[in-house]
Image: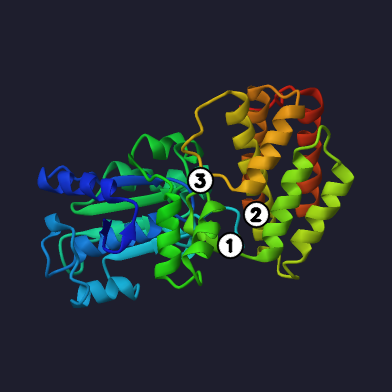
Amino acid sequence: MSWQGIVGHDNVIEQFRRSMAQHRLATTFLFVGPEGIGKRTFALRLAQSMLCTISTEADLAPCGSCPECQQVLSDTHPDLQFVCKPVDRAFIPVEMFIGDREHRMRSGLCHFMSLTPAGGKRRIAIIDDADWLNQEGANCLLKTLEEPSPGAVIILIGTSEQRQLPTIRSRSQIIRFRPLSVEQVAQCLLEQNLAESAAKAHDMAMRADGSLSQAIALADEATIEFRRELWQELAKTTIDRIGLAKSITEYVDSAGKDTPAKREYLRHTLVAAMEFYCAVARRLSSADATNIHINRELAHAVEAACERTILAPEAASSLVERCADGLRQVNSNANLAMLIEAWLCDMATTVRTGQPLLNSA
């Protein structure tokens, strides 16, 4: 089954249908789950359902053809505003919420949500990249979240509850999205003509960790080979910081001169390392991993690492968190060379001592 062509989240739409039927729809939602699994698409289709003038709101089945549905699809609906972090900024600018200095509280999302709906009975705001809300931005939102206008619906989209500020988390109804299955990712790849065969789609899906966008990003042969070599290096009893830094830098530089592209390649590196240490932590803790899909190269590297390592499961988990911290630094526009050096230094220390990082959660 799929809702409006969105695969894998039927349980979430049923949750919204029950809320609609009981007239208990919240005003603020926090969508959390891995990147690339359809949270943004789901939010837009949900907004379209609420703004459609042909279908009833309780059905959550937008007609797709009325002017309101078409306006949502073209990002021109007067009662829908979408906010996301600019690529050149570390956080969502407060101006997006309260306007620039010359238009304070007369423009921006907060002003938009205070107005009476232009057409129907709802005003809807979707805040993408909620992981990159800083304290200042969150404070700007507080009054809007605490005293919503009639018919207001605000949807924030992030990757986890832990990455949200307490002021946001405590005022939101949390909606958890699960990663897609291998079969679902493969289905999406075939339906969107992103794989030339079912076998290729399955191979891509096996590397995707439940994320369609990751499946697409990791389809590049050079990236596949780099990940394989990275896992082999991480499986050794010691980390060659100098050699590995050189390999990572060469891979990142292969993205070209564009800095955002280089950051994306470094994200691929950190995600691959995180996959490795997640699998190592599961293996060391003897947790049941029969339903965890990892590809053959990763499985071999994990087995080799677990035969040689002195890591405790807690230390492996701390390496996962260190990779996640590296991802946060990449997204905060940290210097790439310094980030790689510091990350590898911490990783090498943990692998050598077998003990968790002191600053690890």
Query: Gap in Å between the C-alphas at discs 1 and 3?
Result: 33 Å
Dot placed on the residue nearer the N-terminal end, 2 or 3? 3
Q: Residue at x 50, y 39 (%)?
A: 292
Q: Residue 58: x and y, percent?
A: 12, 55
Type of amino acid at the residue the image marks with label 1: Ala
CB atoms of marks 2 and 1 within 8 Å = yes
Query: Gap in Å between the C-alphas at discs 2 and 3?
Result: 30 Å
In the drawing, does residue 55 fall left or right of residue 102? left
- Secondary structure at badge 1 equals helix
| Corner quadrant of residue 78 | bottom left
Question: Quick check: can you spot residue 83?
Answer: no
In the drawing, does residue 251 fall left or right of residue 198? right
Type of amino acid at the residue the image marks with label 3: Glu
> Measured along the vertical axis of the image, is residue 122 above or below residue 27?
below
Q: Residue at x 60, y 29 (%)?
A: 283
If the image is split into quadrants, where does the N terminus sit?
A: bottom left
Location of mark 3 (residue)? 136
In this rendering, the count of numbered labels is 3
Question: Quick check: can you spot residue 38?
Answer: yes
Location of mark 1 (residue)? 217
Q: Residue 72: x and y, percent?
A: 29, 70
- Secondary structure at badge 2 equals helix
Q: Nearer the viewer, residue 155 or 266?
A: 266
Pointer 2: residues within 10 angstroms few (<14), some, or many (20+)?
Answer: many
Dot placed on the residue nearer the N-terminal end, 1 or 3? 3
Residue 268 numbered mark, or none: 2
